[in-house]
Image: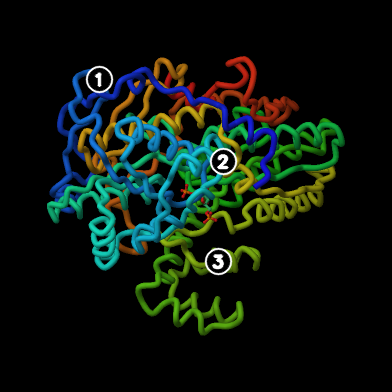
């Protein structure tokens, strides 16, 4: 296999480990703290997880570990969307296991959770591991969005772990995948099966975080990759002075990526879904706010600019969110809805069918949207019941509506600029980049730490590395019970226990920092050009975490 010069050189990079994970494993132990509670709906969550609920917070400290050299067989699963650093989680886990006992084995589930259900594994050895150290992507073993939830799948997993002598399963995933990890841990416990489950917080979206999980891996690299591209576009816009660029950014629901990219690049407009929801802004009000900035800049002769749009925006607009939520229920696959809907072969008959099944306000909103957006809203939900927002062209919707608004203002003699807009969507471009030094170090530490939690016999935990806004020699390690992060949410029309998603907090420092400057960025051309991620050079350039992490933790 031929490899690039950078990949060859990145193989040599030695990820930094926090002090608690360095040295002799026989001197590393886990200390348990107070019992915990779920963040909400305590009684319901406790009833659903009677064997794992309330477990204590775990901290990695120095002490005498008599089990350090036990031989273990672990299975590792990459779950959900790709995020830079996944291979380094596996590398940290592998190195920890082999350091403990050379006979320990690591089995990689092929193609995500399905690989675990079907017992399809590849055994990871030195050669395989070394070919993927410090690389982006999940291609070493592949990923998938299947769930391990149905009784028959849980039973299959039990048969697979017994057949392969597996002592523990590592789920590398986001909120939904780690909710699955908690379900699996509870199931094994209910059968008195001595198999542990530990999760590692992955998602570029940055929405799996709380007091103990400061950030999910991949967020750092993805935001830096998008910010490089936004900065380049900003420079192009300021050179040619003739285009408005509407850039949609991934992040499914939460707007963390968009906010971080705004802090890194200082665009003219940046929409934040959570603010739209809090202020109950209608689609028309949002369009008006963007058009006003376009008009103000036109008055100064600046018929160009940058608008950042989070991909989840559409669901936060109250009237569209209500429509999407009812559409998801009506089209949920567990009843006759979709079958009936599929019989409608034209957009007109689809709309007529939906008019009978939607509340009249929702049906009106649907009718008011451009045809393409209507079609995109009907697309299949993912396996967790989420609308696939990456497939909805919100950036094009906004361009279309801003254009209409400016036309009206031009007729009313309120606007006389030129509006020529281009659209972009940055999402997949950032999910498999070479992990930044931060993600390379953080992921390796998460994986190594997960091994320490297994070694201590813990189950139903997420690997937790803290103080990550500081240099790696100050990081601390531990484990947080997954049930502690859970609440009950409505999914596909039914209440379900899930890890609470962390949305952008409007009173938090990242949003406040942005809000204090956005009016200035709107009219001035204050773009920043972060440039490409740097892997070699001074720590101020190469090892800095995101602005979000620094602002939140400092
Ligand atoms: P995860 O939550 O699984 O990490 O995935 C996040 C994400 O990248 C979102 O930002 C995006 O909306 C979605 O995945 C796209 O999904 P897919 O890869 O299935 O198109």
Q: Which residue is mark 2?
A: 136
Q: What's the distance in space between the residues labelled 3 and 2, CA to CA?
A: 39 Å
Where residue 308 appears, as percent x and y from the top left, is 64, 40
Residue in front for this viewpoint, 491 or 358: 491
Q: Determine whether label 2 and label 1 are within 8 Å by CB.
A: no
Q: Secondary structure at mark 3?
A: helix
Of tags 3 and 2, the one toward the viewer is: 2
Left or right of 143, for residue 246: right
Where residue 201 appears, as percent x and y from the top left, is 39, 39
Where residue 415 appears, as percent x and y from the top left, is 80, 43
Q: Secondary structure at mark 1?
A: helix
Residue under the image location 78 percent in, 52 percent down: 407
Q: What's the distance in space between the residues labelled 1 and 3, CA to CA?
A: 62 Å
Q: Which residue is mark 1?
A: 27
> Mark number for residue 366?
3
Q: Earlier in the sequence, mark 3 or mark 2?
A: 2
Left or right of 459, for residue 230: right
Mark 2 neighbour class, 10 Å CA radius: few under 14, some 14 to 19, many 20 or more: many
Q: Secondary structure at mark 2?
A: loop
Residue in front for this viewpoint, 186 or 364: 186
Q: What's the distance in space between the residues labelled 2 and 1, CA to CA?
A: 32 Å
Instruction: Please say if 16 is above or below 172.
Output: above
Residue under the image location 24 percent in, 47 percent down: 167
Place residue 40 in its image quadrant: top left
């Amino acid at each position: 296999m031929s490899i690039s010069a950078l990949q060859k050189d990145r193989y040599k990079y030695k990820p930094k480990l926090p002090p608690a994970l360095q040295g002799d494993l026989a001197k590393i132990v886990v200390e348990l703290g107070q019992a915990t509670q779920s963040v909400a709906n305590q009684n319901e969550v406790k009833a659903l997880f009677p064997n794992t609920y309330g477990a204590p917070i775990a901290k990695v400290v120095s002490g005498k570990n008599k089990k350090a050299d036990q031989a273990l067989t672990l299975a590792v699963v990459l779950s959900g969307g790709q995020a830079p650093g996944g291979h380094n989680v596996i590398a940290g886990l592998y190195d920890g296991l082999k350091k403990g006992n050379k006979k320990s084995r690591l089995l990689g589930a092929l193609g995500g959770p399905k690989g675990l259900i079907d017992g399809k594994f590849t055994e990871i050895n030195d050669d395989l591991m070394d070919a993927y150290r410090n690389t982006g992507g999940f291609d070493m073993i592949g990923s998938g969005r299947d769930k391990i939830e149905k009784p028959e799948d849980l039973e299959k997993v039990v048969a697979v772990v017994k057949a392969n002598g597996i002592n523990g399963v590592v789920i590398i995933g986001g909120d939904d995948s780690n909710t699955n990890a908690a379900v699996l841990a509870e199931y094994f416990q209910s059968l008195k099966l001595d198999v542990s489950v530990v999760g590692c917080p992955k998602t570029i979206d940055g929405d799996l975080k709380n007091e103990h999980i400061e950030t999910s891996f991949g967020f750092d690299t993805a935001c830096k990759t998008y910010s490089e591209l936004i900065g380049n576009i900003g420079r192009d816009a300021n050179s040619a002075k003739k285009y408005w660029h509407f850039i949609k950014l991934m992040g499914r629901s939460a707007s963390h990526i968009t906010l971080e990219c705004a802090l890194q690049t200082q665009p003219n407009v940046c929409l934040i879904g959570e603010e739209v929801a809090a202020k109950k802004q209608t689609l028309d009000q949002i369009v008006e706010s963007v058009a006003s900035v376009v008009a103000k800049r036109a008055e100064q002769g600046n018929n160009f600019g940058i608008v950042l749009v989070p991909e989840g925006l559409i669901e936060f607009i109250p009237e569209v969110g209500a429509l999407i939520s009812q559409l998801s229920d009506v089209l949920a696959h567990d009843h006759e809805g979709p079958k009936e809907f599929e019989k409608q072969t034209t957009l007109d008959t689809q709309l007529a069918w939906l008019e009978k099944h939607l509340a009249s306000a929702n049906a009106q909103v649907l009718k008011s949207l451009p045809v393409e957006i209507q079609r995109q809203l009907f697309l299949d939900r993912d396996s967790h019941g989420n609308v696939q927002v990456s497939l909805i062209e919100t950036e094009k919707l906004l361009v279309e509506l801003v254009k209409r608004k400016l036309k009206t203002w031009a007729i009313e003699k309120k606007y006389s600029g030129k509006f020529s807009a281009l659209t972009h969507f940055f999402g997949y471009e950032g999910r498999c980049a070479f992990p930044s030094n931060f993600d390379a170090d953080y992921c390796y530490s998460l994986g190594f730490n997960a091994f320490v939690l297994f070694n201590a016999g813990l189950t139903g935990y997420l690997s937790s590395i803290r103080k990550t806004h500081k240099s790696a020699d100050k990081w601390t390690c531990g484990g947080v019970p997954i049930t502690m992060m859970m609440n009950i949410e409505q999914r596909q029309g039914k209440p379900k226990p899930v890890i609470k998603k962390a949305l952008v907090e409007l009173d938090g420092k990242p949003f406040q920092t942005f809000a204090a400057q956005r009016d200035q960025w709107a009219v001035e051309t204050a773009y920043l050009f972060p440039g490409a991620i740097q892997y070699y050079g001074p720590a101020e350039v190469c090892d800095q975490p995101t602005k979000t992490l620094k602002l939140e933790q400092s």
